[in-house]
Amino acid sequence: MTTKADFTNDEWTHLLQAPTAAGMYIMMADPNFVIGSMKEAFAVSAGIISKEKESNSELFTALLADFKEKEMVKQARLKFEEKNLEAMKQTSLNALKKVVRLLAEKATPEEAAEIKNWLYELGVKTA
């Protein structure tokens, strides 16, 4: 079983950024980005909260618990170096790819699948 302790602080921050990255990527793919962004942000938040009671994974439970901590959420915000849409989409996509690599390296296949499926579900809810 994988725990939060198996990740460095930087790696954990990347895991915390994943839901935002998934939501942002979907939001930026929408031509009505500004209009739909509130609805989509709500979908990401609701997706984080709704999953909490469904997991038996210590890793996933710790990840979800950190979303309740304001400072952790603030620390995990994606940082966009460029403010153009394509660069922001690429930053979001790169963040997700990094999380997939981290999960492949450190989590069990079951834990990795659960988190990746959750991120996919967040993307679907956001769309």
Image (cartoon, helix red, strand yellow):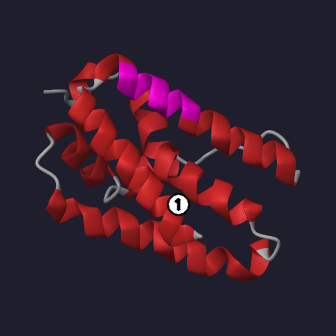
25 sits left or right of 113 in the view: right
**Residue 77, how many percent across, how many down?**
56, 49
Could you tell me the amino acid type at mark 1? Gly
Residue for badge 1: 123
In the rendered image, residue 59, in percent from the top left (x then y), is placed at: 22, 38
| Quarter of the picture holding the N terminus | top left
Q: Which residues are magenta?
A: 97-104
Residue 62 lies left or right of residue 9; in this view the side is: left
- Tell me which secondary structure the magenta stretch mostly adopts: helix
Name which residue lies at 25% across and 21% down.
6
Occupied quadrant, residue 54: bottom left
Where on the picture, by quarter, is residue 23?
bottom right
- Residue found at the far right of this picture: 84
Quadrant in which the C terminus is drawn: bottom right
| Percent of width and height locating residue 96 | 55, 38
Q: Is residue 104 visible?
A: yes
Which one is in front, 27 or 15?
27
SS assignment at label 1: helix
